[in-house]
Image (cartoon, rainbow, N blue to C red):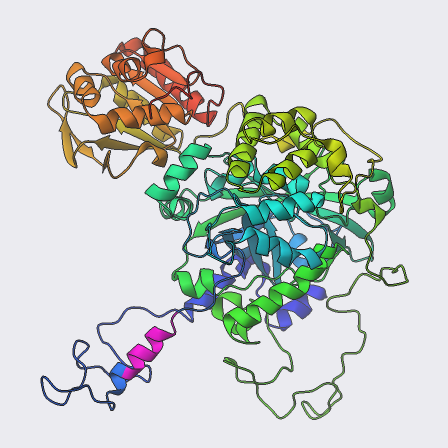
Amino acid sequence: MAASRSDSRGKPKPGEQAAAKTKQLEGFSQALEPVLTTDSGVVVADNHNSLRAGARGPTLLEDFVLREKLVHFDRERIPERVVYARGAAAHGYFELTRPLVEYTRADFLQEVGGRTPVFVRFSNLTGARGSADTVRDFRGFAVKFYTREGNYDLVGGNAPVSFVQDAMKYPDFIHALKPEPHHDMPQASSAHDTFWDFASLVPECTHALMWLMSDRALPRSWRMLEAFGVHTFRMINARGVSHFVKFHWRPKLGKHALAWDEAQRLAGKDPDFLRRDLWDAIERGDYPEWELGVQFIEDSKVASLGIDLLDPTKLVPEEMVGVTIVGKLVLNRNPENFFAEAEQVAFNPGHVVPGIDFSNDPVLQGRLFSYGDAQLARLGGPNHHELPINRGVCPMHNLHRDGLQRFTIPKGRVSYEPNTLATGSEFRMDGGQQGFQSWPEDTDPPKGRRRSPGFDDHFSQATLFWNSQSTAEKEHIVAAFQYELSRVETAAIRQRVVDNLAHVDAKLARKVAEPLGIGAPDARAAAGRSGFREAAPTKTIERSASLSMETQGSSIHGRKVAVLMAPGVELGAYKVIQQALQEAGATTRVVAAHLGSVASSSGQQVPVDHTFAAMPSVMFDAVLVPGGANSAQALLANGDALHFVLEAYRHCKAICVIGEAAELLKKGHPSLAEDLAVDGVLVGTNDPVARNQLAQDFIAAIGRHRHWMRAHVDATPA
């Protein structure tokens, strides 16, 4: 009965659902035409010259073509988002792989195999719209599901925790994080006094700080981004039974990071690195994919967790509540127009559908207001939901009137409820059982400005995160803290930060403090400051494997491998390895001193894709240097080629050198002159018997992503 009612309202049927949004957007698309007109459709005869009084006279005010063109040009920009301004997006679909009938009545979570169109926006928290992609920052991961019951927005990010526990502090946090107001610097960076002043005085930030200083804040690709719903939500089934839920997005390609030095260089070489990576992958058919996992928590078991589910600075370790995989997300189409889609899309965590509801998380409660309010200011008024990218695929009918830029044309005389004039019979919506039903939760009076005691534990989960990291990851966290705090001019701020870190881990605090020119970390001093709270957790675990990004191997699908060549290159081993890489899903690009082609030792002409100057090693995941004496000598004599290989070595990438090409590492890196037996470096020969094994070993090395414990990295002259 429910399905027939849905279909009778004009909702797309299940089999049509995945294509419904694409079909809808096509109705708003505008193709290029061999004619130019004004906004009112008048053909423009001359788009090169304004109307003047004589060839050298003044421009005339009556030139309506010029006026219209300039008026529109002057208003092309709209206010950028206050946070998450820098971003890009893609279309795709969500497919359910496990029915959730027992947990929710949400229509799109009922039928296995059902596909729901989605639009996903990735973004950086801190920087302006024109800032670089690869800065150290939290990333937004917002998914708009165009369901048959309305739009559902799951607005999350690549960290499962918030910096603050109450929406009241969010503007203060962002003001401290953004460029300092007196000179508007630094851009897209947390390495400055105001941010660390705030963080040192608000210890509830500590857990999120650990994530920000970790490799999680430097993703190799949005396609390799693990993301979370952050807050606790509710699911309610058809019987009215509720479960608390937390959402997880797990990338099919694994979760991987850039090296910090590499990220900085990329910000200069290609500020669009992450958005270009996403766009190019979709264009070549390497569609990014994530699994959606959910932690289900029965209401009756919440108290026994020992974790306050309403505290957004806490996560629920998977060892305590497992993650159930329920579906997959696939992105398979780039936007037709960046502004019309990626910029005008309006996400709001308040967009939910029947069967999904909110928790009393104080930050979530603030976001329910703030997101909608921000869209009103940014998109010009209350009708932004009628923009093509924001429209639902199900029928929309409300009694709102007028407002700026109303697109739809409501018919009839009635714009109120209840009424009898619309159809001749009474229309009334007064407490029925259809549609969205809020969870009937009991509240705890009296009202007041206070926090739950369960929010007072500020450090135990920061310690859990630290303990869960590998040796290399811990080194990266220490280095990140040291770098950030070395940019802080006020010594007292640096001291307060390391004092707080002493409550996370004493060794961590000592190592961070070493180069900062301050006193030893003092945990007691931190405990004596205003705002400090440290409640002992009722239940703890030592470490959680899922919090580490370290991998022993993953798919190399979508990875980019640079192949360095010069005249005289030997192609035998190269062709075998290239074929193996392509079969594994990687792409290879030939990089040389000049565009055109390179002549091999046998006279074959090999097309060149890039030059060393235009496409440095930071743009690739691995490096292959085929053999050939003349080729190796030419590369060794080329400073750009030598830097290319050494830079890849410094960034711990997989490197395969064949035959004479090994000299690039031996002569270029003093520490490698005698021994190339280094983690992630493969040295091959032109022996045909060994080529297949060399190819498989190289693939395995790339699959490990980075070889963080590689020797002699700091001594690398690159």
Number of dots carrying numbers? 0
> For the point 17% across and 37% down, which residue is it?
595
Q: Quadrant of the N terminus?
A: bottom right
Q: Residue at x 25, y 31 (%)?
A: 590
Q: Is residue 702 above or below residue 201?
A: above
Q: Is residue 696 left or right of residue 588?
A: right
Query: At x 44% / y 57%, what residue is drawn?
Result: 129
Residue 307, image quadrant: top right
Q: Is residue 338 left or right of residue 137?
A: left
Q: Quadrant of residue 654?
A: top left
Q: Nearer the viewer, residue 500 or 242?
A: 500
Tell me which segment is drawn in magenta.
67-76
Residue 82, how many percent across, how many down? 53, 61
> Residue at 68% of width from left, 50% of height from top?
164
Instruction: Determine the residue located farthest toward the top in the rendered image.
Output: 674
Tell me which secondary structure the magenta stretch mostly adopts: helix
Residue 526 vs residue 153, the one in the foreground: 526
Quarter of the picture holding the C terminus: top left
Residue 20 drawn above or below residue 398: above
Residue sitting nearer the eye, 680 or 147 = 680
Judge whether 420 appears above or below 495 on screen: below
Magenta-colored stretch includes residue 716: no
Q: x%, y% of residue 395?
A: 59, 72
Q: What percent of the width, then of the height, locates residue 448? A: 85, 61
Q: Is residue 170 left or right of residue 598?
A: right
Query: In this orientation, which residue lies closer to the viewer: 207 or 190?
Result: 190
Q: Relative to residue 353, is residue 669 drawn left or right?
A: left
Residue 370 visible at all: yes
Residue 228: in sight, yes or no? no
Please state the horizontal and vertical placement of residue 502, each as a whole percent of the image: 70, 31
Check the image and report above or below for 660 versus 160.
Answer: above
